[in-house]
Image (spheres, grey):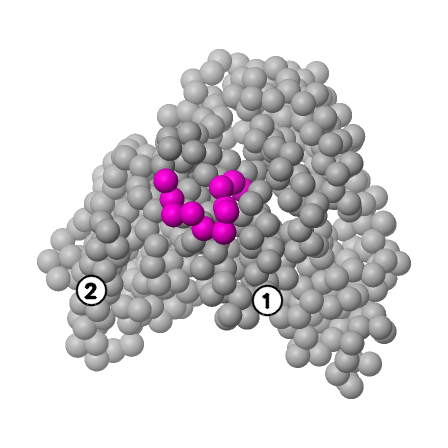
């Protein structure tokens, strides 16, 4: 009831801000810059939903905005540099037209960052954290009405708030958060400190959201969480009772229920943790025809010693054994992964273990990162920090291996028929359409725009490193006359 009353209060603040803005007799605009992961993008969609309900229209031009919002990430150092650079640029606009500047997200949970903002960028109006996102209408109202600056950051784990307005970036694909926070405390990662401990959403709320997305015509959903395959684990351990719904009591059972929802044609999820990849999840992926067979399985390092120092809780051998089990049980499985290069103390020989895993697994996609020190994490205080020149040398070596494998992997697609969800026109060529395969490969092809939002079959005719080229399969249903 407390959660419901809080949401109702924020809906009332939305109306209050809307009334203030309506009295100004001008069309107000807002801009938003999102940094970081898909969870941040999902949070931004909620912020956009609330802001547009308050009477603002989105613009991509900061110079036009009356309200500028930053939704920040603190996983990489370059995000800080980007934020501070943008804040410096906005000083002129603040002086010229009095724009409202709001900063939220993970970075605002770090005290040294908020202190720097207040000291170096005192013209910032609102600072809010990951646990107070839902209160943005109230915070904005107070700034507008009381003409004061406001800091709204909580250090405790926030509740899961349902019922916020949301403005999605796509009308074909949508992300659905199933849990917040993380309990893993990897020694390089700041996320548990800024997003709090694991809290799962109620099964009913997730299913109702997906069912509503289906009614709206969405074809693909991505389930989001820092550790999705531990969904409901903490609640079971703490004996927290959610209302029983469709026999959902784990991530595997959640996948099976969503798989039955009519209209949804594809289900993806990020990010699972290898240590929690149980047999029932593997079986659910294999059994559920809508669950994509591309699985993101973060590696981070291929060396057991480095993995232990990262606090990853698995060895190189256990990771490879898990991969073999998944390949044996899931037909047409493909894998993507995350890898960190240059973790403190990593030797050349230990780095070679990472290359060895990459060679053996043959990942479909590899997201590569140079280790970035984060204040507040154990990794930041470790000795033997790797010099930047060595990090970059190793990164380039990994990049060269990965790109050679991409070219090799792409060859297996040529001459095959692939089901592709058509997402829209190509960013580089408006005469071409673009979509993705089950394995998340980008495919470009010539076709009528009426196919956008549909799953179609394409003959793959060539590969071009980062994308495939296709043409409509002659057996694919009814084809518009101009693309036959």
Circle nearer the N terminus (2, 1): 2
Q: Please, is residue 357 above or below residue 89 in the view?
A: above
Say which of marks 2 and 1 sits in front.
1
Q: Say few, some or many: other residues with alpha carbon within 10 Å of mark 2 (under 14 / 14 to 19 / 20 or more).
A: some
In the shown orientation, is residue 197 left or right of residue 342? left
In the shown orientation, is residue 321 left or right of residue 108? right
Numbered range of the magenta stretch: 241-251
To which residue does mark 1 refer?
Answer: 263
**Which x, y percent locates residue 472?**
80, 71
- Say which quarter of the image contains residue 272: top right
Mark 2 to mark 1: distance in Å? 34 Å
User: Which quadrant holds the C terminus?
Assistant: bottom right
**Which x, y percent locates residue 106?**
37, 41
- What's the residue at 80%, 73% (across, down)? 476
* Numbered circles on residues, count: 2
Pick the residue in front: 103 or 132.
132
Q: Which mark is residue 159?
A: none
- What's the residue at 34%, 54% (across, down)? 162
Question: Which SS does the magenta portion mostly show?
Answer: loop
- What's the residue at 69%, 54% (across, down)? 289
Any magenta on residue 242?
A: yes
Pick the residue in front: 157 or 110.
157
Q: Are marks 2 and 1 in contact (CB under 8 Å)?
A: no
To which residue does mark 2 refer?
Answer: 12
Q: Say few, some or many: other residues with alpha carbon within 10 Å of mark 1 (under 14 / 14 to 19 / 20 or more).
A: some
In the shown orientation, is residue 4 left or right of residue 389? left
């Amino acid at each position: 009831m407390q959660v419901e009353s809080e949401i109702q209060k924020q809906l009332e603040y939305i109306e209050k801000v809307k009334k203030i803005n309506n009295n100004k007799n001008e069309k107000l605009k807002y801009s938003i810059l999102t940094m970081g992961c898909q969870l941040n993008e999902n949070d931004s969609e909620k912020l956009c939903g609330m802001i547009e309900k308050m009477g603002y229209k989105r613009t991509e031009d900061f110079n036009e905005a009356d309200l500028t919002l930053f939704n920040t990430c603190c996983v990489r150092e370059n995000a800080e540099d980007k934020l501070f650079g943008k804040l410096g640029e906005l000083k002129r606009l603040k002086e010229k037209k009095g724009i409202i500047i709001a900063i939220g997200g993970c970075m605002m949970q770090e005290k040294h960052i908020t202190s720097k903002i207040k000291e170096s960028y005192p013209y910032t109006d609102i600072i809010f954290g990951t646990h107070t996102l839902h209160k943005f209408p109230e915070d904005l109202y107070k700034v507008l009405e009381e003409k004061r600056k406001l800091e709204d950051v909580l250090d405790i784990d926030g509740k899961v708030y349902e019922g916020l307005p949301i403005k999605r970036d796509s009308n074909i694909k949508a992300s659905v958060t199933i849990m917040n926070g993380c309990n893993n405390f990897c020694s390089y990662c700041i996320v548990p400190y800024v997003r709090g401990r694991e809290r799962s959403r109620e099964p009913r709320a997730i299913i109702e959201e997906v069912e509503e997305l289906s009614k709206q015509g969405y074809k693909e959903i991505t389930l989001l969480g820092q550790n999705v395959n531990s969904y409901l684990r903490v609640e079971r351990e703490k004996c927290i009772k959610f209302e029983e719904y469709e026999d959902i009591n784990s991530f595997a059972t959640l996948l099976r229920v969503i798989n039955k929802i009519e209209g949804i044609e594809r289900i993806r999820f990020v990010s699972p943790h290898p240590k929690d990849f149980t047999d029932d999840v593997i079986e659910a992926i294999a059994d559920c025809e809508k669950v994509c067979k591309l699985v993101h399985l973060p590696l981070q390092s291929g060396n057991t010693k480095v993995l232990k120092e990262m606090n990853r809780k698995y060895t190189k051998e256990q990771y490879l054994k898990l991969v073999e089990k998944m390949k044996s049980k899931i037909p047409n499985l493909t894998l993507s992964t995350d890898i960190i290069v240059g973790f403190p103390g990593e030797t050349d020989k230990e780095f070679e273990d990472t290359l060895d895993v990459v060679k053996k697994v043959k990942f479909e996609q590899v997201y590569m990162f140079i280790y970035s020190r984060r204040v507040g994490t154990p990794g930041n205080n470790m000795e033997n920090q790797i010099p930047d020149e060595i990090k970059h040398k190793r990164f380039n070596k990994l990049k060269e291996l990965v790109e050679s494998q991409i070219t090799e992997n792409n060859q297996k697609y040529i001459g095959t028929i692939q089901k592709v969800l058509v997402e829209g026109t190509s960013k580089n060529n408006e005469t071409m359409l673009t979509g993705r395969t089950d394995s998340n490969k980008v495919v470009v092809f010539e076709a009528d725009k009426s196919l956008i939002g549909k799953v179609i079959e394409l003959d793959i005719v060539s590969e071009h490193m980062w994308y495939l080229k296709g043409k409509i399969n002659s057996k694919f249903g009814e084809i518009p006359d101009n693309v036959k």
